[in-house]
């Protein structure tokens, strides 16, 4: 079975500062990894996904993530955040042979002016 | 154009009164998911369909049922809602297993009074 751990429940940061949201996964099979963003009272929107190939994945809104197989991590980064990035961010995993998409507990990114 | 549509966006129901939430998709995806998300928590998978094959999570209460009459539509039935069932219910679709990303609807916020 697959699982995902997001180590930080909240990350406060000032506008224009860099940010990293951490995600670690566990799986006995090959996995596909995703980052989703959720704004208040909205559904989830895909930021980026890792399928295979290059370990550095670029997504929307200036976000990127790096897949590290040896550390079983898929951390999300942005070099300079904006107020509008304030939201809940979820890391998710799906095993290569399943339909199930499993989410981490989420990280609340709060950007201050 | 909305691709995964959930109706209604907000639903108020009485304690113990059956309620149905609906989801439709225009993507012709094989997989449809129902997630329950309580305040400040991760989306929790209740069940999913791969075409007509129904997959129930082991910890999904019997109070929750689902129907998928065709590819486009999926329903979540709560037979006797309790106060603890108040949550955001998210519907998502996916093209298939493995690498396919999930597309989410806007969610239905269920209040039980």
Image (spheres, rainbow, N blue to C red):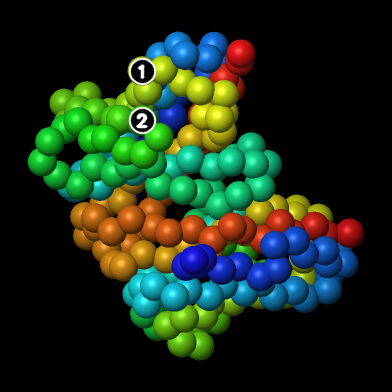
Q: Are marks 2 and 1 on the same chain?
A: yes
Q: Left of B31 or right of it: where is A8?
A: right
Q: Secondary structure at mark 1?
A: loop
Question: Mark 2 near mark 1, Cβ–Cβ under 8 Å?
Answer: yes
For image coordinates 54% across by 11% down, the residue present is: A14
Categorize mark 2 by other alpha carbons within 10 Å: few (<14), some (14-19), many (20+).
Answer: few
Residue A93: x %, y % from top left: 33, 45
For image coordinates 29% across by 44% down, the residue present is: A49
Q: Residue furthest front?
A: B1
Q: Secondary structure at mark 2?
A: helix
Q: Left of A71 or right of it: where is A86?
A: right
Image quarter for residue B6? bottom right
Q: Which mark is residue A107?
A: none
For image coordinates 50% across by 88% down, the residue present is: B69
Is residue A91 shown above or below A51?
Answer: above
The number of callouts visible is 2
Q: In the image shown, does B83 or B109 lie closer to the viewer? A: B109
- Give the residue pinned by disc 2: A62
Residue B32: x %, y % from top left: 44, 69
Q: Quarter holding the C terminus of chain A?
A: top right
Image quarter for residue A112? top right
Question: Circle 1 marks a residue in which chain?
Answer: A
Q: Is residue B85 visible?
A: no
């Amino acid at each position: 079975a697959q699982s995902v751990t997001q180590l930080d429940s909240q990350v406060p940061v000032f506008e224009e500062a860099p940010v990293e949201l951490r995600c670690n996964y566990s799986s006995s099979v090959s996995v596909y990894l995703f980052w989703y963003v959720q704004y208040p009272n909205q559904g989830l929107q895909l930021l980026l996904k890792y399928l295979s190939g290059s370990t550095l994945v670029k997504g929307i809104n200036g976000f990127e993530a790096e897949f590290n197989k040896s550390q079983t991590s898929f951390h999300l980064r942005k070099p300079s955040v904006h107020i509008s990035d304030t939201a809940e961010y979820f890391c998710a995993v799906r095993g290569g042979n399943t339909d199930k998409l499993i989410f981490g507990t989420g990280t609340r990114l709060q950007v201050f002016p | 154009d909305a691709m995964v549509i959930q109706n209604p966006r907000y639903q108020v129901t009485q304690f113990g009164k059956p309620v149905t939430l609906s989801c439709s998709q225009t993507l012709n995806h094989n997989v449809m998911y129902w997630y329950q998300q309580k305040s400040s928590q991760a989306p929790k998978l209740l069940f999913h369909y791969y075409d007509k094959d129904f997959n129930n999570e082991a910890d999904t209460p019997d109070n929750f049922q689902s129907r998928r009459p065709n590819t486009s539509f999926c329903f979540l039935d709560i037979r006797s809602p309790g106060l603890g069932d108040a949550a955001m219910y998210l519907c998502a679709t996916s093209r298939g297993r493995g690498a396919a990303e999930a597309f989410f609807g806007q969610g239905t916020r269920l209040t039980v009074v």
